[in-house]
Amino acid sequence: MSIMFNTDPFITAQVIDLVLRERECSLSSREWKHRLAGYGYAIKDTDHGEVVETLPHHVEVAVLPAQMSA
């Protein structure tokens, strides 16, 4: 299986914006992750931080800023 990565900065900025807005609306980390799944995204813990990835294909879109950690 090959690992795919997003390389488009416009898409990255839009996804990070969505993630930030959804985090502000959520009461808990669990609700936040559930809301993101509804948009087709998941948060994955990695060695280089938390990463937003697409569902179901697991394409890494962006690394979350450190202050976003849930």
Image (tube, rainbow, N blue to C red):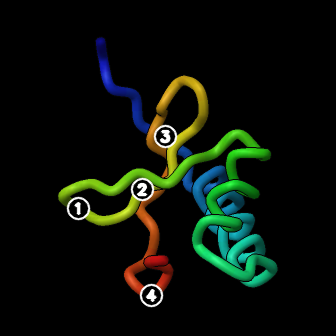
In the image, 11 versus 46, the foreground residue is 46
Please name the amino acid that badge 3 sits on: Asn
Q: Are marks 1 and 3 in contact (CB under 8 Å)?
A: no
Q: Amino acid at mark 2?
A: Val
* N-terminal label among 3 and 4: 3
Circle 4 residue:
67
Residue tagged 3: 6
Quadrant that contains the N terminus: top left
Does residue 11 appear to the left or right of 5 in the view shown?
Answer: right
- In the image: residue 16, left or right of residue 6: right
Q: Is residue 61 above or below residue 22?
A: above
Q: What x and y, as percent, mark residue 35?
A: 75, 57
Q: Label for residue 51? A: 2
* Residue closest to the eye, 42 or 59: 42
Q: Which residue is mark 1?
A: 48
Q: Residues within 10 Å of mark 2 (few under 14, many from 20)?
A: some
> Are the two marked residues, 2 and 4, in contact with CB atoms closer than 8 angstroms?
no
Which of pointers 3 and 4 indicates the residue nearer the eye?
4
Q: Amino acid at mark 4?
A: Gln
Residue 13 rendering spot, x and y as whole percentages? 63, 63
| Residue 26 position within the rendered picture, expressed as x and y whole percent measured from the top left | 75, 77
Question: Is 21 located above or below residue 51 in the figure?
Answer: below
